[in-house]
Image (cartoon, rainbow, N blue to C red):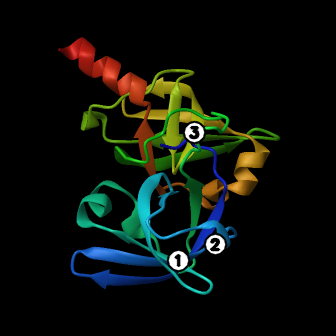
């Protein structure tokens, strides 16, 4: 389980196809603290560390993950948001994040607000997921509060700290991102449908 509070950025060093899977080799600022078999959220997608090298580590994304996330769009040099799984004795600063991406979204607009930014996203309205105004959403692994919510889209406000310490600063209109909708909202919707 994660909280959506990004710890650092990883750089994609290399990508290798292995059948329908992709093996990613990445570098990160806390490499010495990683271990094999550890869960690590990459742009919100939970991946297992399979190898640790002198200056890099490796993870594999299977076809199921690649089909539901934006990981296939990564290239060498891409910067990826990272979060290690939550410690049981740690603070819960974000919201409940599983590291299971629900769908991808597209950046529709970025508006500078003289000290912050408003990012607007669109996603397939038939994905059976919804946002609610002032509810939680996880974008590329970042725990955020929804500003405006509408069918197939939403907006969020990004403070300077988040902008500088995540890959949001690399987004432009058309950038594809990973979304994980609020787990409590998903269960409530399922319960109410039943």
Q: Quadrant of residue 158?
A: top right
> Could you classify mark 2 by the number of other residues whose Cα lies within 10 Å: few (under 14), some (14-19), or many (20 or more)?
some
Mark-to-mark CA distance, 2 and 3:
21 Å
> Mark 2–mark 3 contact, CB under 8 Å?
no
Of the image marks 2 and 3, the number of the one nearer the N terminus? 2
> Could you classify mark 1 by the number of other residues whose Cα lies within 10 Å: few (under 14), some (14-19), or many (20 or more)?
many
Q: Is residue 188 above or below residue 114?
A: above
Mark-to-mark CA distance, 1 and 3:
25 Å
Report x, y in % for residue 24: 44, 76
Residue lying at 57% horizontally and 43% vertically, measured from the top left: 4
Q: Quadrant of residue 122?
A: top left
Q: Which residue is mark 3?
A: 88
The tag on residue 57 is 1
Residue lying at 47% horizontally and 43% vertically, measured from the top left: 1
Report x, y in % for residue 123: 37, 42
Under circle 2, the secondary element is: helix
Under circle 3, the secondary element is: loop
Report x, y in % for residue 185: 39, 23
Q: Which residue is mark 2?
A: 31
> Could you classify mark 3 by the number of other residues whose Cα lies within 10 Å: few (under 14), some (14-19), or many (20 or more)?
few
Mark-to-mark CA distance, 1 and 2:
7 Å
Of the image marks 1 and 3, the number of the one nearer the N terminus? 1
Q: Say left or right for 179 vs 193.
A: right
Query: From this viewpoint, which residue is outermost toward the front?
Result: 89
118 or 85, nearer to the observer = 85
Which of labels 2 and 3 is toward the front? Answer: 3
The quadrant of the image that shows the C terminus is: top left
Q: Is residue 25 above or below residue 89?
A: below
168 or 182, nearer to the observer = 182
């Amino acid at each position: 389980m994660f909280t959506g509070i990004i710890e650092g950025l990883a750089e994609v060093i290399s990508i290798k196809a292995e059948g329908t899977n992709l093996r990613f080799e990445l570098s990160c600022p806390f490499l010495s603290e990683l271990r094999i078999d550890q869960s690590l959220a990459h742009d919100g997608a939970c991946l297992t560390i399979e190898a640790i090298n002198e200056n890099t580590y490796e993870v594999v994304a299977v076809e199921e993950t690649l089909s539901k996330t934006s990981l296939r769009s990564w290239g060498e040099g891409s910067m990826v948001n990272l979060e290690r799984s939550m410690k049981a004795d740690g603070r819960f600063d974000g919201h409940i994040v599983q590291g299971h991406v629900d769908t991808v979204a597209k950046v529709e607009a970025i508006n500078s607000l003289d000290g912050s930014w408003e990012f607007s996203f669109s996603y397939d309205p038939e994905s059976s997921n919804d946002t609610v105004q002032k509810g939680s959403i996880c974008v590329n692994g970042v725990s955020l509060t929804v500003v405006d919510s509408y069918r197939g889209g939403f907006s969020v406000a990004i403070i300077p700290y988040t902008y500088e310490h995540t890959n949001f600063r690399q987004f432009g209109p058309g950038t594809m991102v990973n979304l994980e909708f609020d787990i409590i909202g998903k269960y409530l919707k399922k319960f109410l449908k039943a």
